[in-house]
Image (cartoon, rainbow, N blue to C red):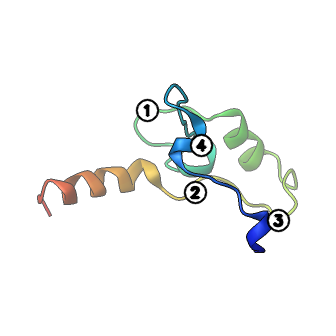
Amino acid sequence: MCESNKIDFTRRAFGGDFSFGAATSAYQIEGAWNAGGKGMSNWDYFTQMKPGGVADASNGCVAVDHYNMFKVYMLQQFSAL
């Protein structure tokens, strides 16, 4: 990046009253579509019950498996593993 194109992207640039936020999509990270008494989401239904609905036939059944991995992470943090 050229020196002249750099942007001051630090916390100070946003002012003291600015709040940063973050978000995720449950379908993209959660996985465990049939665990914990959850029902199918609209996307779970669409990707599993409508063959060909998604070009590569992918679905979010596992995704990044946050639903299960969160528990592992918490156990590791508390030295239970």
The amino acid type found where label 3 is placed reads Asp
Report x, y in % for residue 12: 52, 43
Report x, y in % for residue 31: 53, 50
Helix, strand or loop at label 1? It is loop
Q: Which callout, 3 or 2, points at the residue further toward the start of the chain?
A: 3
Report x, y in % for residue 48: 72, 49
Q: Which residue is mark 1?
A: 37
Q: Which circle marks residue 56 in the picture?
A: 3
Quarter of the image for the N terminus: give it.
Answer: bottom right
Q: Nearer the viewer, mark 3 or mark 2?
A: 2
77 with respect to 33 (left or right): left
Q: Nearer the viewer, mark 1 or mark 4?
A: 4
Q: Which callout, 1 or 3, points at the residue further toward the start of the chain?
A: 1
Q: Which residue is mark 4?
A: 13
Q: Which circle marks residue 63 in the picture?
A: 2
Q: Which callout, 1 or 4, points at the residue further toward the start of the chain?
A: 4
Helix, strand or loop at label 2? It is loop
Q: Nearer the viewer, residue 73 or 57?
A: 73
Quarter of the image for the C terminus: give it.
Answer: bottom left
Q: Which callout, 2 or 1, points at the residue further toward the start of the chain?
A: 1
The amino acid type found where label 2 is placed reads Ala
Q: Nearer the viewer, mark 1 or mark 3?
A: 3
